[in-house]
Amino acid sequence: MRAIVHAAAGGTEVLELREVPTPEPGPGQVRVRVRAAGLNRADILQRWGRYPAPPGWPADIPGLEYAGEIDVPGAGAARWHAGDRVMGLVGGGAHAEAVVVHQDEVLPIPAGLPFTDAAAIPEAFLTAYDALAVRGRLRAGERVLIHAVGSGVGTAATQLAQRLGATVLGTSRQATKLERAKAYGLDVGIDTSIASFRDAVGAPVNVILDVLGGPAFADNLEVLALRGRLVMLGFLQGTRTEADLTPILRKRLEIIGSVMRARSLEERIPLVREFAERVLPMFKPDGPLLPVVGAVFPLTDLARAHEAMERDETFGKVVLVWDTR
């Protein structure tokens, strides 16, 4: 099969299209023929050599989410049949023509959704759902602040927060992204190229979904309400900070770290099951939940997709597709 491989760390020049052995499913596993795959910041970090794949996943083939068809069920994998349209998360290896996964971490593609839309769901919506509903315990009537609201996770979190009945605030350095996010449920857009979000939030917020990291930490603590929850998903602006920690004690704040990629199969399966029951039925051609695909690139031109994401040109998800041959 064909796969994107990077044997060394570096720029986009290390990305190579190669023929590699096609993986075989073991007991309880299925092999999926990948038709489309998402591109995530983690793929760029892995290319830079800063975010290696977890044990058990391909070390040199990136890709954390896929959409495609069941190709070969392994022994005892009775939940799925050849030809079933499916999607899901993996620890790596999705930027290939086939990927092997456990049958219980696979999600069905909602009826009417093309593969390109389906590939924009798993990482963004599972991450956002887990961060907001499970770990952040966001409730109706609360205020939530979503950093990088124009990203894949940001646009997913905006829609989910609206469905949960929250008032949604979001940050971006681009006014155009804030304007586009209003169509997905953003109530208050904060342009951080003009001023700090700390000065623009107004009333305190109950939950913050943060991907910025160190430089935003002190301001996050200040704008949280009593018993507020800060859910940290990434460190786009760095891991170092100098902050007054007094608000954590004074306001009884919760600082919650979360990462999806490194979770064990035993952790992922219950989340996938809950997501399938509570969230998946809301994906329909006319909503209420919609995958936001900002750009589509052929996997054979993955370098250009990486460059577009690094330049922060896209809104929503970047999706990759295999050409036909």
Image (cartoon, grey):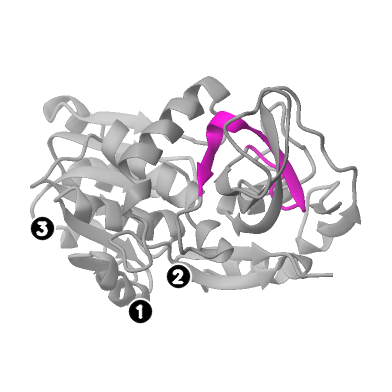
Identify residue for label 2: 315
Q: Nearer the viewer, mark 1 or mark 3?
A: 1
Mark-to-mark CA distance, 1 and 3 = 22 Å
Determine whether label 1 and label 3 are within 8 Å by CB: no
Identify residue for label 1: 176
The magenta segment is 91-108
Mark-to-mark CA distance, 1 and 2 = 9 Å
Tell whether 124 sits left or right of 136. Answer: right
Residue 276 showing in the rendered view: yes
Image height of 173 relative to 258, above or below: below
Q: Nearer the viewer, mark 1 or mark 2?
A: 2
Q: Tell me where residue 73 appears, x and y as whole percent.
A: 71, 35
Decide which of 8, 269 is in the foreground and name it: 269
Identify residue for label 3: 202
Q: How many marks?
A: 3
- Identified by mark 2, the residue type is Phe
Determine whether label 1 and label 2 are within 8 Å by CB: yes
